[in-house]
Image (cartoon, helix red, strand yellow):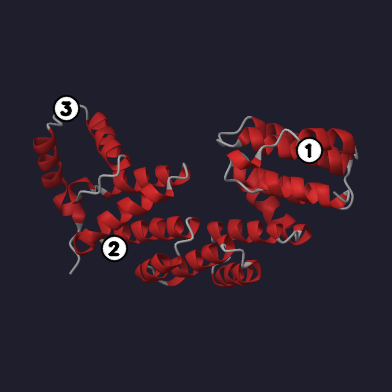
Amino acid sequence: PRKDIGDSIEKKTKELVDEEDFYDNDLSEYMLKIQALIRAGNSDSKLLVPSIAIKTLRELYSKGKYHMVIKICEGFLKEESKMYFEACREIYYLLCLSLAREKETVKFNTAINGLQGRDKLFVQGFMQRINGDLPRAEGTFKKILNDTPNYTKALRELVTVLILQQKYSEAICMAKDNYEKDSANPYYIEAYFRCLVHERTHSYDDRKLLQKLIELMKNSYDRHKDLITIAMEAEYLFYIERNISEALAKLQTIDTSKSPIKYPEKAKSEILSKIGL
């Protein structure tokens, strides 16, 4: 039977403090030290204080350090029998997302069995999207949303899949809804902009909104915001201002080789295709 790790946190904390000479009266500093050990790739079970470990894993994932997340998750899961359900579920979930990002199909197909129900279906759809099987991914996320209409992550992924298939008119209402619920989220800013800028006609208010979305991205917390902003400005020049020369000049400043994000490359490709280049 699984043992609730919460019952042993005090004991594990004492062990870590004693063994690593981590004595400190400031608990927040102590937690930062645990996070530092995990970020360095240490998956010792004594570090598995769920709230700290999972937060650290999420941070590593958001920074694109997928190999590190995989290594740490696999290490923690060696102690799976001692973990309570929610911690185990979160670790399997992050492991599957990271394996999908790295396209490690064999490991992914094994790890996914650690998930159930909606979580399992979601990571399946995520892997389908990463592998470029967009119609299947679309079907998977629509199935999830049919059962759970307010599942935000699936809604976000469905918008992404539709945009990748250039189904902008189908995605725009969902993209707008996501943005209006969280207008500071760079992911939602970008998705809504991409849908709106591809509309056939644009009113004065549409133009003002597109300009606002560019400014929001420019001032966002996204680590790739500069590159994304350039792509948005180029699309605005091309689709709204019909200024092909300036759009092309802006596109020439985009170096997609230095970024893992696909939007700037996709925007550049679509514009060049439309002018026959």
Q: Is residue 130 above or below residue 20?
A: below
Residue 91, quarter of picture: bottom left
What amino acid is labelled 1 in the image? Ala
* Residue at image location 47% in from the left, 44% down from the top: 62
- What residue sits right under mark 2 in the picture? 85
Query: Where residue 129 appears, x then y in whole percent?
Result: 58, 63
Precedes in sequence: disc 3 or disc 1: 3
Query: Where residue 239 appears, x then y in whole percent?
Result: 85, 44
Q: Is residue 42 left or right of residue 144?
A: left
* Residue at image location 36% in from the left, 44% down from the top: 55
Q: Can you tell which mark lies on residue 24?
A: 3
Q: Could you tell me which secondary element the residue under label 2 belongs to?
A: helix
Residue 182 in view in this figure: no
What amino acid is labelled 3 in the image? Asp
Crowding near pointer 3: few (<14 within 10 Å), some, many (20+)?
Answer: few
What amino acid is labelled 2 in the image? Phe
90 or 182, nearer to the observer: 90
- What residue sits right under mark 1 in the picture? 234
The answer to whether mark 3 and mark 2 are in CB contact below 8 A is no
What number of labels is visible? Answer: 3
* Residue at image location 36% in from the left, 61% down from the top: 92
